[in-house]
Image (cartoon, rainbow, N blue to C red):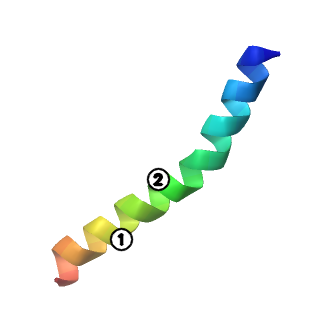
Amino acid sequence: MEAAVQFELVANRLPFQICIVGIILSNLIFG
């Protein structure tokens, strides 16, 4: 149960982290 909850939290957070990384990279490239 705990592992499933942790996996769900990570899965929910992953797209947010990818978005942040994409914003930082675009700032470095185009900034």
Quarter-of-image position of residue 8 = top right
The reply, left or right, for residue 6 in relation to residue 31 is: right
The reply, left or right, for residue 8 in relation to residue 29 is: right
For disc 1, the marked residue is 23
| Location of the N terminus (image quadrant) | top right
For disc 2, the marked residue is 17
* Residue at 72%, 17% in the rendered image: 3
x and y percentages locating residue 19 in the rendered image? 47, 64
* Residue at 17%, 72% in the rendered image: 28
Circle 2 crowding by C-alpha within 10 Å: few under 14, some 14–19, many from 20: few
Which comes sooner in the sequence, label 1 or label 2? Answer: 2
Q: Residue furthest bottom?
A: 30
| Location of the C terminus (image quadrant) | bottom left
Vertical position of residue 13 compared to residue 5: above or below: below
The reply, left or right, for residue 28 in relation to residue 19 is: left
x and y percentages locating residue 22 in the rendered image? 38, 66
Kindly identify the amino acid type of the residue bearing the numbered disc 2. Gln
* Total numbered circles: 2
x and y percentages locating residue 29 in the rendered image? 19, 76
Kindly identify the amino acid type of the residue bearing the numbered disc 1. Ile
Q: Nearer the viewer, residue 10 or 26?
A: 10
Vertical position of residue 28 compared to residue 2: above or below: below
* Residue at 47%, 56% in the rendered image: 18
* Residue at 67%, 26% in the rendered image: 6
x and y percentages locating residue 23 in the rendered image? 35, 71
- Badge 1 marks a residue whose secondary structure is helix
- Badge 2 marks a residue whose secondary structure is helix
